[in-house]
Image (cartoon, grey):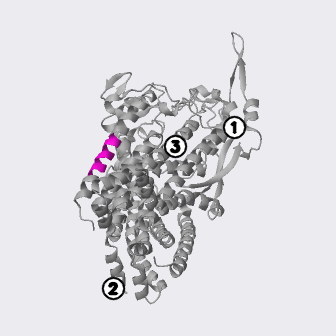
Amino acid sequence: MFARIQLTLRQHRLETIALFVLCGGLALAGVIEAWRLNSLNFPHSCLQDGRVVQYWYDGSSAPTACQLASKKFYDLVWSPDMSIVAMFEQILPFIVGIGFGAPLVAREIETGTAPLSWALAGSRFSWLLGKIVAVVVVMVPLLLVAGLAADVREGALVPGIDPHAMFDSYAARGVFFVFWGLAAFLGTLALGTIFGRTMPAVMVALIVCVFVRGLWEPAWTHTILRPFAVEADYQWGSADLFVYNSDQLYLDGKPWNGDLNQWFNEHQPAPPVMATPDASGMVPSSSAAVSNAQPVDFGPPPQPITYVIHGADYWLVTRLECAVLLAGSLFCGAIALFWVGRRKPY
Amino acid sequence: MFERVWLTWKQHRFETGLVVAIGLITAVAALIEAWRLNSVGFPSSCLSDGRVPYWYDPAQAVTACQAAGQRFHDIHNEFDFGLVAEAGQLLPFLAGLALGAQLVAGEIDGGTAPFAWTLADSRWKWLLWKLVAAVLLLVPFMLIAGMAEDVLQGAVNPGLSAYASFENYTARGIFWVLWGVAALCGTVALGTIIGRASPTVLVALVICIFARGTLEPALNATVLRPLAVLELPRIHTPGELVVSSGGLYLDGQPFSGDLQTWYQDNETCTALAGGGTECHSPEQGPEDSSYAIPGNQYWPVVARGAAAMLAGTAVLAALGFFLVGRRRPY
């Protein structure tokens, strides 16, 4: 078993080295960025609601003593190196998965070594299964390390909230790294087995991954997560997962079906009223004579109700989504195993 | 010549089909999304700085514009719209990568390089014709997609010309072509070094992401910096490009003191009836100014950015030619 793993990794040594370098590099970069943020020692008393670092510049909301610390914090958060680390956290599992999945079968077929490999191996099924196990054994722990480092970085970005109790970038960190990587790997493996060519498998897999990743969160919030959503209070924020807004507008807690334009027309401030000139034709200078149209507080306008999932349900959502990703991965793996037994070796 | 170009396209028919599909599908999708936004018919009198204000905020939007604003933003916030609008962040690279990885690395990987290079007069000429075929394919289709993205940008901000606004400017228009050709030449050079197609694509993808992430900060700090003018806090022009911070300003003058000390010195404290004091910060303190390039400088900025990118592309192409003449064909 160990010999087969070693052989597979040696055969794909470029991909293996790239996996170690990319995962190790990103994990290190994530931890360093988290350390840089943490070493600013942002005062806990300055956190908004004890959770989020406010933007330094907004004098009306951030306490004055926090301005400098907040400026330093955001200078770091918006620095190019932080952006690059964040960008890589979005794509690393896909690069690793596609990088390993595409050549595993397609390259053997493409270079004409498949007939020999398949003839030497007792069965094609066990040949491919051995290769899959070899890749998974190496890929899973490395992606997990990179994902946990991304969790640490996220924790430093929002110092007042446990990263496992908030939904900020939740599908681009933590255990999701492993499941995205597995899905990309087994999906690309299936494509490579069907196409029998590496490059088309890579390209189609890249496009499919972009679509799936982009559609993932909207698809979940439109379907499976809806029943779990609860009405948001006025201070819902980055810890919560926005699910949807009600179609119905509400005013003072009651359904409101009027015309929105008309409501705003009726509730906007009155236009300025000019004072009447006195007998001498002069306008009294007293400021009371001119009614400046001051905004009148009519309370909140008609608005939809927002439904969210609270950060406390992080693990519930993560478990559900990872289970679906795993099921999809296993399905793709099954297609690859089925197809490799049926297809011609050229 | 035409035969040689045609042969290259036929040899790489999957990649050729991919580039054509990327160009045409993006263009059609962008035009459809632009048409959907334009068909809302948002009144020009309701625009705020050339943009459609958020329908819900009565402080920003005139009341008569609420319904049209809501319809506009409903479309603008849809997922498919975001996907089309952001296509320029990825697709030009994919097109360049797909073609570039196969040109040399595909031949070496497939074992046909010794044969192809022996038949050709010289390796340089062989690569030159392949690159010409790839560029002839990339340029028109990327240009079509980029111009459609410009049309979409014009629909997003109906009061601002897409050519007088720097919003998303490196992901539309001529930049589609520039990114595609840069990715092509870079991938050819990388493929010549690695000699295997699939690792070339993945390494090139990582490099492209780096390049995409760092190009704008690099341009802002170098070639675009001389075009920028100082804008005091709270002064902005529609469509401008902010290239750097201009430092803190207070009452129109540069502020060089300690921010925390200033806020502490300017607090107003009142004694409370029950004892103790209540302090309030001043509403406006020192604020950040910026160096920005106004939207009417769009074409000079694009020209400088394009020149920098073309120079980089030429270096990568030269590297590809140098390496292909030197390396072993296996």
The amino acid pointed to by label 2 is: Glu
Q: Tell me if A85 is positioned left or right of A65 in this view.
A: left
Of the residues tagged 1 and 3, which is closer to the observer?
A: 3
**Residue behind mark 3:** A145
**Residue behind mark 1:** A68
Mark 1 and mark 3: Cα distance apart in space:
34 Å
Tell me the chain of label 1: A
Question: Of marks 1 and 3, which one's residue comes earlier in the chain?
Answer: 1
Mark 2 and mark 1: Cα distance apart in space:
66 Å
Q: Quadrant of residue A127?
A: bottom left
**Residue behind mark 2:** B3
- Give the numbered dot on residue A141: none
Main secondary structure of the magenta stretch = helix
| Helix, strand or loop at mark 1 | helix
> Which residue shows up at 48% across the image and 63% down it?
B204
Q: Nearer the viewer, residue A37 or B63?
A: A37
Give x and y (percent) for residue A319. Answer: 38, 34
Tell me the chain of label 3: A
Q: Nearer the viewer, residue B64 or A34?
A: A34
